[in-house]
Amino acid sequence: MTDPFSLSSNDINSAIRISENKWKMLIISLSGIVLLFTLYCLSSGITIIFMHLFYFPIILLAYHYHKKGILLSGLLGALYVLLVVYYLYPDTNEILGAFVRFIAFVGIATVVALLSIFLERQKTSYQAIFNNANSCILVLDPSDMKIVDANPECHDFLGYEKDDLTGLSLSRICKENKITPEFLNKITVHGNIENYEIQLIGKDQTEKTALISTGVASEDRIVLICTDVTEKTKLRDEISELNQIQNSIISNANVWLMLLDRKGNVRLWNKAAEELSGYPESEVIGANNIWKKLYPDPEYRRNITDQINEIIISQNFLQNFETTIHTREGKEKVILWNTRGLYDESGVVSSYVGIGVDITGTVEIKKALQESEEKFRGVAERSSDIIMVTDQNGTTTYISPSVMRILGYEPEEMMETTPNEFVHPEDLEQAYESIKRAASGEITEKTIFRVKKKNGEYATMDMSISPIIENGVFKGMQVMG
C-alpha cells in the first residue's frame, strides 16, 4: 500500500497539473459559452439578463487564480464592454451601463479573490497544523462515528497507516471494542469535549491511554484530538500507589509520627500519636495548642521548648530527647523524640518531621532495676560474707567491701579478674565445673575453694554459686562465701 504521506514531488506535480487542466477547461468553456450567448443576444437586440451570466466565469477566475484572476476578469469584462459598444453604439445609456457593470465585475472579482486568498491561507494553516501536530488527529463522521481522515501522528501513536484508519469505526480502536455511552453522550449533547481519558488499542494490540478533546468542525464532521498520556498515566498510577503505601505506613506505624511547620502547627498526626496522647487528629491538625495540653506545666514547657529550639537552630535535628507528656486521660508518659528539618526548594527548612517512641515502660524498668541494684549493694556492702558478681565470661564486675577484711584486697583489685588468678591451681577444675553447672542454670552450694589472700596465703572458703538468668539467657553468676 502506498503511504499517502510519502508521495514524491513528481506525483504531487502531476496531480496538480491534472487539476489545473480541469480548471482551465471549465473556465475557458464557460467563458466561451457566455461570450457566444452575449453575441447572440446583442445581435438579436436583447439587452437584459444575459450580462449576469458573466458572474460565473468571473467568480471562478477570481476564486482559482486570485490576483491573476482579477486581471482575467477585467479582460473578460472589457470584452463585454467592447461587444456592447460595437452592437449598441450610439446608445449612451446602454454603453454607460456596460461600463458600470465592468466596474462591478472587477469589484466582485477583487472581493472573491481576497476571500479566496484568505481561505487558502486558512486551509494551508490548518493543513500544516493537521500534518505536523504532535497529537493524533482524527476526523469523524458523526452519523456513524467512522474515521474519514487522520494525520501522520496517528501512525506513530497507534501504528495504523492513514488508509488503514480511513473508514474504520472509532469503536474499533477503543478498548473492549466499544465507545462508552458516557463518551457518546458528551459528543452528541455537548459537541465539545476536553481532556476525556479513554483507552485506545494500537494496531499491535498495545493498550494506549489518551486524553481526547473533540470539536464540531461542521454538521458532518467532528475533529478528535488524541494526546498520548500512557507513560504519564503509568507514572501517575505509580505515584498514587506510592502515596497510598506511604500514607498507610505513616498511618499504621507503631511510633508517634507528626509533621510540624516552623511555628509548631501540626500538619500530620498519625494513629499512634492519637493513641499515645489521647488526642484525635481532628483536634490537633492546623494548630499548635496541643503542646499546652501535653505539657501543662508552664515552666517545664518553657524549659523543654528552649532546649529544643537551641538544639534545632544549631543542628536542624533533635536526637534521643526525652520529655514527659500528660495524656488526655491525665497519665504521664515518657517519650523519646527524634526530629529532623525538611528543606524546601530554596534550601530553607520549612517543616519538621517528629518521631516519638513511648519508653515509659523502659524507664520504669530501669528505675526498678536501679532501685533493686541499690538495695542489693546496700545488703552486699553490709554483709560479713564476700559477695561477688561476674559476667557471662567469668570476669568479676562487682565485689563487696568485705573482701578487704577476709582476703586483704581492695574491691577494685579484684575487679576484672578470673578464677585462674586467685583460685588454688588444684581447685581450678572444681571451680570451672561449678561455673559450668551455673551456666546451665544449676545452683551450686557448699563448694570448698582455696582462695589466695593478698599476703600469699590461702584461705579455705565455703562458696555457693547461683546463675544470673535474664530472659532465659545466662548473663553471669553471683558467688557468696
Image: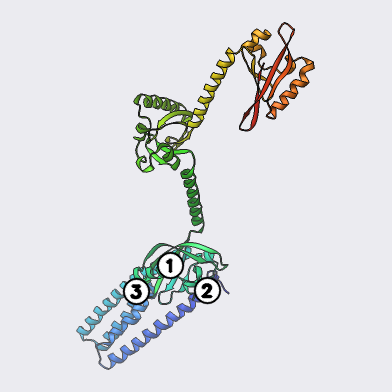
Looking at the image, residue 307 lies above or below residue 219: above
Quadrant occupied by the N terminus: bottom right
Residue 133 shows in the view: no
- Please name which of the two marks, 2 or 1, marks the residue nearer to the observer: 1
Q: Point out residue 335 in the picture as x, y percentages from the top left corner.
A: 46, 31
**Residue 449 pos. (x, y %):** 74, 16
> Alpha-carbon neighbours of circle 2 within 10 Å: few (<14), some, or many (≥20)?
some
Q: Is residue 170 above or below residue 472?
A: below
Q: Foreground mark, 1 or 3?
A: 1
In the image, taking residue 236 as reference, residue 288 lies left or right, namely left
Q: Secondary structure at mark 3?
A: helix
- At 63% across and 12% down in the image, what residue appears? 411
For marks 1 and 3, give the CA distance.
38 Å
Camera-side residue of 413 and 307 = 413
Query: Residue at horizontal 43%, vertical 83%?
Result: 25
Crowd around label 1: few <14 · some 14–19 · many ≥20 (10 Å): many
Q: Amino acid at mark 2?
A: Asp
Amino acid type at circle 1 is: Leu
Marker disc for residue 70: 3
Q: Earlier in the sequence, mark 2 or mark 3?
A: 3
- State the SS at label 2: helix
Identify residue for label 2: 163
216 vs 249: above or below: below
